[in-house]
Each structure stands twice: as C-alpha cells, then as structure tokens.
Amino acid sequence: MRTPRFKLPRETSAVYHCISRIVAGEFLLAPDTTKERLRTMMRRQAAFCGVQIITYSLMSNHFHILTRVPAQPDLTDQDLLKRVETFYGKSAAESRFIAESLRITGSIPELDRVRLLKRMHDVSVFMKELKQRFSVWYNKQHNRFGTLWAERFRSILVEDRPEVVRTVAAYIDLNPVRAGMVADPADYRFCGYTDAASGNLLAINGIESFEGPEGGDWRKVVGKYQITLFGKTRFAGAGADPDLEIEKIRALWKGKGRLSHLQSLRLRIRYFNDGAVLGSRLFVEEMFRKHRDRFGPKRTSGARPLRRLPFKGLRTLRALRKSIVA
C-alpha cells in the first residue's frame, strides 16, 4: 500500500519539492531538446493547474521542481475557458466544447466545471499529468513503449517561509554543480536560477516569490538568493569560489569536518529529498499532530534535526538512519 503524501488542504497555500527519476537511471533526458520539451510542458501544465514554479532543475536522468500551490480561488467560467484554451489550444475539441457551452447557455455545465477544477490546484495532479504527457511525447518521438519513470514522484512538504524556501531552492539549483557538470549554476541552462538571470519573466516571478505568496522585488530578492547560493551578491557567471569545490567539501564531510551552510548545500542531502516535511520545529510538529495516525505509539514528537548539518532552524519529519548525505 502506498504511503499517503503529506499535503495541505486545497484551501491552504503550500510549497512542495517534487522529484522524479527515469527508469533504471537511464540518461534519457540528456539532450537539450528533450529538456527543453520537458520545460515547456512543465510551464504549460503549471499554468493550467494554477500552480507556480518557484525553481527547477532538469537533469539527465531525473528532475526537481519546487512549486507553490496557492489556495484554490473561485474561478469564473471565463477563467476556466482561458486556462483550457491556453493549455489545449483554441481549436482543440475540449476548448471548442467549453466555449460553445458558454456561448449557448452562458455557463459551463456543472459536471464539466467540477471535472476541470479537480485537475487544478493539486500537486499530485500537476505532477501526474506532466509525467504522463511527457511520456507519451517521448515514446512517440523514439518509437518506444512502456514506462518512462522509475516510480511515482516523491514530494516533500516545505514550510512556506522565505528563508526555508530559499534554502530548498538553492539546493535544487545547485544540482548541476553537485553532479560536476558546472562549477557555477549560472552556467547550466536548465535550472531556475539561470532562467531568471537570463531575464525569463516566469522564472523571475518564481524567485520573487521567496518573499511569500505576494512576491517581492527582483532586484532585492535576487541579492538575498545569491548570498544563499554563493555567500555573496554577484553577477551570473562570475566564476566559482575555490572554497566551494565539491571534492574538497566531500573530503571534509568524510573526515568529520564541520561544514558551512554554503558547503552543505553542495552535497546531496537526503533530508531535502526524503524528509517528508521540512521547516521550523513548530511547522513540523504541527504536521506530525495532524497525521499522528501514520506513526507508531512510541513516537511522541515529530520534529527531527538535520544531523551533522548546520541548518539549525530546520527540522524534518523523517529521521534518516543511514546515508544522510550522498
């Protein structure tokens, strides 16, 4: 039986770190054209579902998406038609049916309205449909059949506070650095930081949202984010800091040395991928109380520290026993 995800109700805005991997770890996403198609589909799916892409990293055999799912608003019939037309195209059968219903009766049939709304403002539906649609496209392009993804996607519920969201976003944007592909995330084309630094408005809006659902000002917010990434404000492509070289950091970790916040983010931290819930002690304890029935009777509290890591304000719901860093 699948373990239920930790999700907030649709009436509440929530942030999720989502990860999905290619079957058998194959590098099927390696070509830039393939990543570009996935990115295009991701943005279109997000617009339809009404979720916001805060940042992302598309790697060769997996991807990460940090998304905010706002509280579900009261959408008018015109709002629904606009989303459908943007997603499918105005000439598609679904779009023409909805538009014709509005023209003739002045409203969308209730069953169709409910059907559409069920596909929106839900992280599970967003990820499921994105993966399904990409699989169909990929298999058709490569004369392939069968599953593309190794498993159902993983998700971590992230407390929606700027300092927490910035930390998780930096961890995601630093994926190509951890993989040894680049020394500076600004040099990797398929991550949210580079996308925003190159002037993409959608990506800029995502980084601005570090200041909360209402957003902030790009010029102010990006400086804070660069400090999280590099320890200082800098221009994109300014070069890597020798003290942040991956091999040196891994050696320091293996030698039981003390890592800084910046150094830690350059390691693969399983808490950020498998921790179930990530945030302040208060936030994690609240999630534990709400889902008390999922845990054994001997467990009396929810919040667990990130062992051997300098994220003092962060707690996780799942205490990993082995390989907290890879």
Image (cartoon, grey):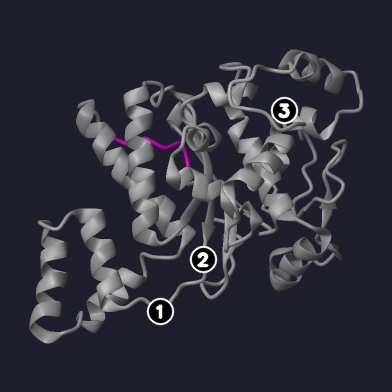
- Identify residue type, mark 1: Asp
Q: Nearer the viewer, mark 2 or mark 3?
A: 2
Q: Position of residue 93 (x, y in %)?
A: 11, 61
Measuring 32% from the left and 34% from the top, which residue is drawn there?
Answer: 37
- SS state under label 1: loop
259 to the left or right of 133:
right
Comparing 196 with 93, the one in front is 196
- As drawn, the label of residue 53 is none
Amino acid at circle 2: Pro
Callout 3–callout 1 Cβ contact below 8 Å:
no
| Label at residue 74 | 1
Residue 26, by quadrant, is: top left
189, above or below 307, in the image: above
Q: Is residue 218 magenta?
A: no
Picture quadrant where residue 323 is located? top right
Query: What SS does tag 2 mark?
Result: loop
Q: Which residue is the site of mark 3?
A: 267
Which region is colored magenta? 146-151
Q: Position of residue 312 (x, y in %)?
A: 87, 47
Identified at 80% across, 61% down, the residue is: 302
- The CA span between labels 2 and 3 is 30 Å
Which disc, if any, is residue 70? 2
Q: Main secondary structure of the magenta part?
A: loop
In the picture, the quarter occupied by the C terminus is top right
Could you tell me which residue is drawn at 60 percent across and 37 percent down? 172
Q: CA distance from mark 1 to mark 2?
A: 12 Å
Q: From the viewer's side, name the closer residue of 21 and 253.
A: 253
